[in-house]
Amino acid sequence: MDDDKGKDLQQTPDHKHHHHRRHFHVWRWISNIILVIALFVGGGAYYLYHTLRSTADHTYIPLDGQKSSDLILKKSKPISILLMGTDTGALGRTETNGRSDTMIVATLNPSKKTTTMVSIPRDTMAKMIGYAGINIQKINAAYSIGGVDMAVKTTTSLVSAPISYYAVINMGGLEKIVDSLGGIKVTPTISFHNSGYTFTKGRSTDLNGKMALSYIRMRYDDPKGDYGRQDRERQVITAVIKTAPALSNLTKFEQLMNQVQSNFRTNLSFDDMVTLYSKYKDAGKHVKQDHLQGVGTYLNGSSYQIASNKELQRISNLLNQSLDLPTKPVNNEETKQNTLNPQFNWNVDNSNVEYIIHGADQVN
């Protein structure tokens, strides 16, 4: 949400794409945050089941023009979901404040038993889809300008792969979620100090809500830059998921459901989530993680990450193949602008060669 010069250009020192298994199952990120009391429901507790469904009803906001997705899920076809973490107040149909600081395109393929997660850096240059004219912004601005609809459409256009679902969690509310659980445990992968708290690499650490946010929000002292911050955010969410099913205190359960209801939104209905939980669990057995790699530069004084045509094509191919769809040449506003900048150095961040936007109505 800031435009600090120089700092936002900090990225992973070497361009490595990670394809490895992780214990973080993306289907749980979506379904377990609502289906967090599966153990209780198994006991036939009507009150708990009713509360669960009521919470899901309050978190459900369909996309504009969305048709029933139940048939797709029942047939266990590969699906794609845009996962977003934002740092705003109450969630609604659109957000007039705040941007989606974390954006991950996740595909779930139950027949291949694979999940593919591609992180999109928040400063990635993108055309805002749904805006009149050509509006070039950082991709995380799409959420603040046009809510989840613009965020999904803009990301779909950027990666040239279909996205049917979204799930957004308010990271500001994550503090209360963690506290409602009585805290979580994480093992930091790096040592650092932030907001009065010290975190030590390799040491299991108990976090309350404030500590969890401090752990997530540090970015500039991480050698991986914003990519490292995204890793820590996923780590905290994973810890929440692991802790929640063990919650046996009814009062704490009610507090947790209240926080989920206030800080989570998705276009997956309760029945969709039940189907997702039952039919897509095996997709979490093999998780591949990757990211869209950009090159740092400035546009109108703001730091951006600009993905090359080759990189956009690579990510598009990866996502479409994970959805069992044919690949196709990427042809969007981003590839057009790249082609109009033959002088740009795609090998060096903070290049002295200026990247020039051509024919846009707005650039910020």
Image (spheres, rainbow, N blue to C red):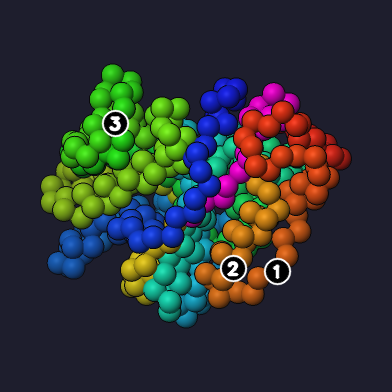
Q: Which residues are magenta?
A: 290-305
Residue at the disc numbered 1: 328
Q: For marks 2 and 1, give the CA distance.
A: 9 Å
Q: Nearer the viewer, residue 142 or 325?
A: 325
Image coords of residue 97 (percent x, y): 56, 31
* Residue drawn at point x = 49 percent, y = 54 percent: 17
Give neighbour class at mark 1: few <14, some 14-19, many 20+ (Cα, 10 Å).
few
The nearer-to-camera label among 3 and 1 is 3
Image coords of residue 87 (percent x, y): 46, 34
Q: Considering only vertical position in the picture, is 203 above or below 151? A: above
Q: Considering only vertical position in the picture, is 269 above or below 302? A: below
Residue at the disc numbered 3: 191
Could you tell whether 364 is left or right of 255 in the image? right
N-terminal label among 3 and 1: 3
Residue at the disc numbered 2: 320
Residue 49 visible? The answer is: yes
Q: Considering only vertical position in the picture, is 178 above or below 311? A: above
Could you tell whether 162 is left or right of 222 in the image? right
Q: For marks 3 and 2, give the CA distance.
A: 37 Å
Numbered-mark total: 3
SS at mark 1 in the image: loop
